[in-house]
Image (cartoon, coloured by chain):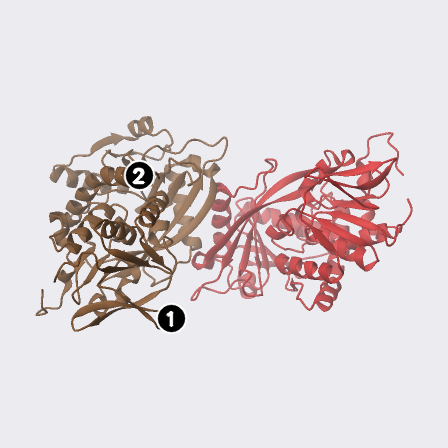
Chain colours: A brown, B red
Amino acid sequence: MTALRSGRLAVVGAGAIGLSAAREAARAGWRVTVYDPAPATGASWVAGGMLAPVTEAWPGEEDLLALGLDSVARWPEFARALSDETGTDAGMHPAGTVVVGTGSGDRDELNSLAGYLESLGRPAQRMTGRELRRLEPSLGPDVRGGLSVPGDPSVDNRRLLAALRAACERLEVTVDERAVTEVREAGGRVTGVGLADGTGAGADAVLVAAGAHSSALHPALDGLVRPVKGEILRLTRRAGALPPPSRTVRAVVDGRPVYAVPRVVPGHGDLVVGATTAENGFDTAVTVGGVRDLLRDAERVLPGIAEYELTETAAGLRPGSRDNLPLIGRIGPDGMFVATGHGRNGMLLVPVTAAAVAALLRGQDVPDAARAADPRRFAPVGAERS
Amino acid sequence: MTALRSGRLAVVGAGAIGLSAAREAARAGWRVTVYDPAPATGASWVAGGMLAPVTEAWPGEEDLLALGLDSVARWPEFARALSDETGTDAGMHPAGTVVVGTGSGDRDELNSLAGYLESLGRPAQRMTGRELRRLEPSLGPDVRGGLSVPGDPSVDNRRLLAALRAACERLEVTVDERAVTEVREAGGRVTGVGLADGTGAGADAVLVAAGAHSSALHPALDGLVRPVKGEILRLTRRAGALPPPSRTVRAVVDGRPVYAVPRVVPGHGDLVVGATTAENGFDTAVTVGGVRDLLRDAERVLPGIAEYELTETAAGLRPGSRDNLPLIGRIGPDGMFVATGHGRNGMLLVPVTAAAVAALLRGQDVPDAARAADPRRFAPVGAERS
């Protein structure tokens, strides 16, 4: 395809991925419209905000680990630039992560993770419960041991969204709150987007960044992304209650994962506790069973939160791909791009995804680590790979 | 004092008590203004809506039982009249209550309640767990036995509030959203109310119905009412989940009381689960510990709610009196009345309280059962009892 500098770009989806890509495109001279019936309220709004390439690592997912490590390295500069540009703190919190276990089965899982990280040459520091409590006094007596992973920081997802929106506004990106129903094409090229009201809007290029809703927008994306529901809680420390941890705490409690991410800026909740995982289609109900599990497991690890205020419950839909790698690249007709399928790693992968989209819009190659995320890896056997 | 028909009445507090009293007064010809900075959003809005004179009965509180029985007998006609008057269903749900226990200690407590009710000549039907599950299939296997109490129905408190507001509007009751800070008096008679903005409003009579906030409004009320916090949850049945019980379910789980009140009208939540009890001043934070206890205990009794949506968490402040009886009557300067201190029984006691206020405004005696609620029972020794 031809690079189309200064053309019209339609971005479908005003989450962290869509907004950060829109910002890059606008900086490169594109006239950008971001379409979203409810900007910045989906999975990006609900997210915990862990930037966790290491503690989310899983044997067999080395491409995802490499992508995450590339992106986490970009985060400090990404956040700094965004903050400078907008005068708004982008919300990055540099403190790392502790991964803790309670029962003996949980310890086995932690040992596996530690061994795996060592085998990758990324050793994590193994710690006893007592050592962990010296680091994070809010950890309760049921914590028997764990790992310290200083390289996995976090971001206040809502501050990030606010900063991205401010940056887009400054760059004269248009936000259009009409719902997009399809990417339109003619003669093998995108022509724009179709809208729920039956009308359409022309564009020279279209970026599908609609998270779990992406698959419905073009036949080339059919079946590539599915919704993976996650429930989270936001807790606020009350007078007299113990302080929250200063690091992200990830735990395995009786085999169930739970995390607690501190928020350092007042007014944004003191602790985000997540996250359940369920695949029920486009259901975003917060369930009794989900909240019960999160509260029980989080209290096992951080007993002082019993005195915290439960200020919010929410559910979001992670865009799950078939292989847990995102889909970042060209797919379908000329001029169509996709940036979705980020699963649990959306916040982490914002900088590398934005950089990859910027490269694609310039007609250049994506960063090396993002090559494995080419969406055409799922192309039907025998299909053309342009 | 002199009856002041057709005078100006200031009602402080637009909860269920204040609004129902305002309605009675307006029907009797008073020009009524109800003051509340946030009408119908306090304890009445948060309430579970049990009309439970029997299952709330406690040895030593026979005056309260008599008052509750008087009021529950008034409820059907009260609800019917209110519905007819406004064309709005007042929300009464005639199905009764089952009281259930799980552990053996809980069974002992239930046996005490059954024995006490029998001693009062109000026998409740003792049932096995199997019999209870036949009545309410949503009860789980941990329920070992209990009582059926058909005479304790419930009301959808939010429908009630809507109906009362409609009735007041129809009767040209004014709702003034300025905050009242004090009852004003001169020469031993009320002159009106003082407002937070420093101004005042004249009135010939003042009814203090400000719930837990009542004590601050006049020195005669000082120390008579205190806030007793209660947390509740609202659950909504989702597709595929088991139906809620048709009766109110009250349980004692490991010694902790929990209740679940079904809502029969869609859009008002399918089940209200309550209620914690805490005395921390005017704190209305919903706590992690409170929600955890309510979910755990309610699930022990009604396991199917795990699949329900948790649609709301809230906390309200019950107005607690020193002896658990409300304060209904004259107190302080001539022309000042009070209707507060209803504790856990506010919804139940709405009709008898409204009737008592109506009688007082006519210069008549309150209903017999309400005589024990005379607020002057707390008058300092030697003080004048007019």
Determine which of the numbered discs, if any, sits on residue A83 in the image: 2
The furthest residue to the right: B2
Q: Which residue is mark 1?
A: A197
Res B151 seen here: no
Would you place residue B54 above or below residue A152 in this image?
A: below
- Real-space Cα separation, disc 1 to disc 2, in angstroms: 37 Å
Front position in the image: B255 or A261: A261
- Image coords of residue A368 (percent x, y): 11, 48
- Left or right of residue A204, residue A176 in this image: right
- Left or right of residue A221, residue B261 in this image: right
Quadrant of res A213: bottom left
Q: Amino acid at mark 1?
A: Asp
- Image coords of residue A326 (percent x, y): 21, 54
Q: Amino acid at mark 2?
A: Ser
- Image coords of residue B252 (percent x, y): 56, 48
Determine which of the numbered discs, if any, sits on residue B63 in the image: none
Instruction: Judge if badges 1 and 2 mark residues of a common chain.
Output: yes
Would you place residue B300 above or below residue A117 in this image?
A: below
